[in-house]
Amino acid sequence: MKKYIPNPQDTTGIRLPEELESLVEAMAKNVHEVWAKTRISQGWTYGETRDDRKKKHPCLVAYEELSEEEKVFDRNTAVETLKLIMRQGFKIIRDDK
C-alpha cells in the first residue's frame, strides 16, 4: 500500500471577514452534531474514556459541554472549509430574508 501523505489546499493567504465569525461557531457546532449523530447511529454511546471495542466516546455530549480543545478542533474544520470555499472563488453572502 502506498504511503498516504495529506495534501490539503493551501489556504494560508485567505482571511475570513469578521462577519463570518458567528458562522464559524454555528458550523463548528453543526460539525460536532453531524459527527455525534453518525457515531450514535453506529451504536456508539457516551463513555468517560474512549473505548473503540465497546463503542464509548467522551465527546458524545452537546457541543456546549465539549472541552475548549475539542471545540477548537471543530472550529478549525469550519474555518478551513470556509477558506477553501473562498479560495475556490466563491463568495459567502448572508441573505437577510
Image (cartoon, rainbow, N blue to C red):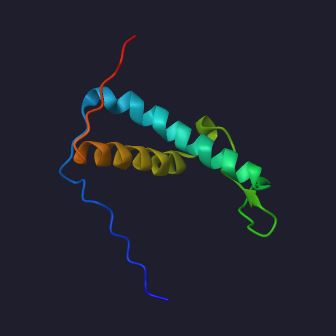
Q: Position of residue 13 (x, y in %)?
A: 17, 51
Q: Is 83 situated above or below 8?
A: above
How many marks do you count on the picture?
Answer: 0
Residue most extreme to the bottom:
1
Q: Is 22 situated above or below 58?
A: above
Q: Nearer the viewer, residue 47 or 24?
A: 24
Q: Position of residue 40 (x, y in %)?
A: 75, 49
Q: Quadrant of residue 91?
A: top left
Q: Position of residue 4 (x, y in %)?
A: 42, 79
Residue most extreme to the top:
97
Can residue 46 be seen here? The reply is: no
Determine whether, in the image, residue 89 is placed left or right of residue 3.
left
Residue, x 66% and y 47% (percent of image)? 36
Residue, x 46% and y 48% (percent of image)? 72
Residue, x 66% and y 38% (percent of image)? 62
Determine whether, in the image, residue 47 is placed left or right of residue 86.
right
Q: Is 7 situated above or below 43?
A: below
Q: Position of residue 67 (x, y in %)?
A: 57, 46
Quarter of the picture holding the C terminus = top left
Residue most extreme to the left:
13
Residue, x 37% and y 13% (percent of image)? 96
Q: Quadrant of residue 25?
A: top left
Residue most extreme to the front:
89
Determine whether, in the image, residue 35 is placed left or right of residue 4.
right
Q: Nearer the viewer, residue 68 or 1?
A: 1
